Amino acid sequence: MRKYSFASVAALIVTLMLGVVFALPARAHASLKSSDPAKNAQVQTLSKVTLEFTESVRFPVVVVQGPGGKRYESGTPVVDGPKIVQAVVPSVPAGAYTIAWRVVSSDGHPVEGEIPFTVVGSPDAPATEATPGSQATPGSQASSGADGSQEVEGGQAAGDSQGGSGDAAATDTAAAQDGQASIPGWAWAVVFGIAGVGIGLYLSLRKKS
């Protein structure tokens, strides 16, 4: 009975030791602690990718894949202990993205994974109010037309004033002509007749003298 108990205890100890031996490498493997952007997150813009692991890592590889399978990472990732920072190209378009990463933990075991997220883009800017002359609106066209018409109307007004002066002069001349034309023909005959009689009397009296 004692031999059986001793064998059971020895087997249990060996099992626990083997479990600890196999657990140590697994516990030494690095794992992703956090990321920015986070998994399935929605961000307005993207300037860089930050990955933080449970321990220091080496030989990082970070790929940022966006719409159409295009890659948007820029340069090589920067390692600072357990943290990795990967820059991306400026002005990334909106769409679905995936961060594919691969690192080597301190025990030499490679670890990799993927982080999906979405870039939604900046919210639409409010519509810019139209400034005078910046947009052709009915009101601005009317005002422009008013300005042009004022210039034309001003020229017309000047012409009208000059034309008015000419019309006034023509009216005065016509009035004078009308005044002359208003004297009847018989009155002219009387005037010329009297003048002829006077001239005849003057000549006859002169001959007598």
Image (cartoon, rainbow, N blue to C red):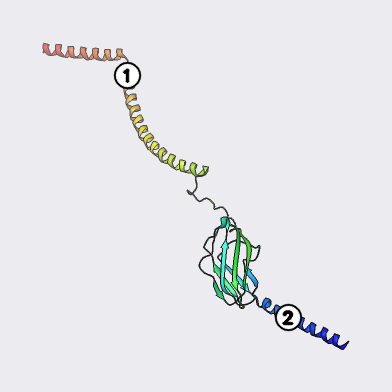
- Quadrant placement of the C terminus: top left
Evaluate whether residue 117 shows in this view: yes
Give the residue type at disc 2.
Answer: Leu
- Quadrant placement of the N terminus: bottom right
Q: Residue at x 57, y 57 (%)?
A: 69
Is 44 placed above or below 130 here?
A: below
Q: Quadrant of residue 92?
A: bottom right
Q: Residue at x 34, y 21 (%)?
A: 178
Is 206 placed above or below 40 here?
A: above
Element class at badge 2: helix
Question: Can you identify the residue that label 2 sits on?
Answer: 18
- The answer to which of 88 and 153 lies nearer the viewer is 88
Q: Is residue 96 left or right of residue 145?
A: right
- The answer to which of 150 and 90 lies nearer the viewer is 90
Q: Position of residue 25 (x, y in %)?
A: 67, 78
Residue ranking furthest to the bottom: 2
Gap in angstroms between the C-alphas marked 2 and 1: 144 Å
Q: Residue at x 54, y 58 (%)?
A: 70
Residue 181, label in figure: 1
Is 154 placed above or below 17 here?
A: above
Give the residue type at disc 1.
Answer: Ala
Q: Position of residue 121 (x, y in %)?
A: 59, 58
Q: Quadrant of residue 204?
A: top left
Q: Residues within 10 Å of mark 1 (few under 14, many from 20)?
A: few
Evaluate whether residue 125 shows in this view: no
Q: Residue at x 22, y 15 (%)?
A: 195
Residue 145, label in figure: none
